[in-house]
Amino acid sequence: MGYHILKIAPTSFFADYGCHVRILEEARGLHARGHHLTVATYHTGATPPGLSVIRIPRIPWHADVRVGSHWHKLYFDALLAARALAWARKHPVDIVHGHLHEGALVGSIVSKVTRAPLVFDFQGSLTREMLDHNFLRARSPLLPLLDRAERQINRLADHIITSSANAAELLVDDFAIPPDKVTTVADCVDTSQFKPGWLDPAVADRAAALRRTLGMPPDRDVVVFLGLLAEYQGISHLLRAAAEVVADRPQTHFLIMGYPGHHYYQSVAQRMGIASHTTFPGRIPYAEAPAYLAIGDVAVSPKISETEGNGKLLNYMACGLPTVTFATPVAAEILGEHGAYAALGDAGSLADTLRGLLDDPAGRRELGHVLRERAERERSWSAATDTLLAVYDRAWRRRAGAQPDAPC
């Protein structure tokens, strides 16, 4: 009969980035196995076809999709808890699945009322994310309080899943979570959707049409980025590296896709004198992402956070794109020996690494094929769904007193 799963997503789901993609693909995998799933989320965001979504009441003064930490989330999360509780009192709930720390906190309330086990989808340290996003400063008096709150939230769940082995080690080593309560369910990618133009002529044709629409010169090598445009994603480092690359290789163009900061970074590129070598199309719909990525010859991810996941690397891999990234544990876990790594936070090193791939067409094509094969072999959502369901079974049986008759 399958589990009845209530996912708590304290964000504007769905909004074409990061953890939203993980929530969506997890939901699709669970639906395909016959499980019943509802997502409780904020009032803004798109509703993916075929997915049950419940939302907090509309907030008239906050009608846009907002990314990252902000003070409005305090009352958003209170409304989310009330909405999820009201729904749970009227519908069966076997598993509460909380995303991010706020989702785990809200989920713990629902879990206590329904007596359903809580699974916490941990995407990185809450306090480190706030520092990375410049929401808090290192000397803020709030930081010790939030650190204690984070440690308490980590202990609320029956089981924690992480998107990387690095995050699992962080929980065990830095937060003293017992290893048997932590399981890595790695970020994955739908390789039937994300694929290179050399595998699918339709993708190649669409990419060519998009390139013409964007007005990009046809004789340039293209470096692509697709993700949130923010400082913690390393966009300023990317623009400084782009300026160095373009100075040496004027036949290079940077297609920097995403939001919310595209207008700001476009103005920065203008001031830096590289506007004619950069294109900022803004937010890219998830369904169109493969074709936009297929415009590229090389992909880049200059993310500087050392604890958060980096799902864009999987999309790059599946699209057969040789990828340059800063050397972080998460990047190394995803790309392995097939990544092209620059020194963390060093724009000059990033530029050198990009030039190395751009100047080696044969090498980058070979690397792209290897990465595509790695994505197909190691990053299947089918395998991830198996692991996720095993976690649900374990959490449910532990909460039920080790009885062997889980709902699935």
Image: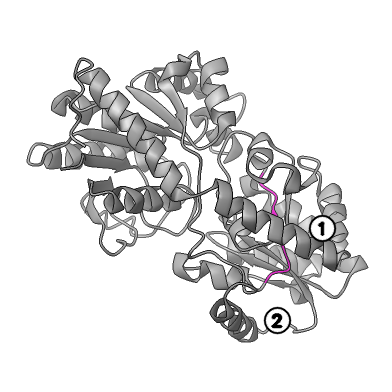
Q: Which mark is residue 216?
A: 2
User: Measuring 84% from the left and 53% from the top, which residue is drawn there?
Assistant: 353
User: Horizontal placement of 18 versus 232: left or right?
Assistant: left
Check the image and report above or below for 125 versus 40: above
Say which residue appears at 66% left-offset and 42% top-offset.
Answer: 331
The residue drawn where x is 30% and y is 32% is: 392
Residue 268, numbered label? none
Percent coordinates x, y for residue 103 in the rendering: 34, 36
Q: Which residues are magenta?
A: 296-303
The x, y position of residue 105, in whole percent, is: 32, 29
Q: Secondary structure at mark 1?
A: helix
Residue 245 in magenta? no
Tag in front: 1 or 2: 1
Three-letter amino acid code at the position of disc 2: Met
Q: Position of residue 404 (x, y in %)?
A: 21, 22
**Magenta stretch encompasses residue 297:** yes
Q: Give the secondary structure at mark 2.
A: loop
Residue 140 vertical position relative to residue 344 in the rendered view, above or below? above
Measured from the top left, where is residue 373 in percent x and y?
Answer: 63, 55
Q: CA distance from mark 1 to mark 2?
A: 19 Å
* Residue 99 visible: no
Q: Which amino acid, by three-letter code, is at mark 1?
A: Leu
Question: Which residue bears the numbered disc 1?
Answer: 354
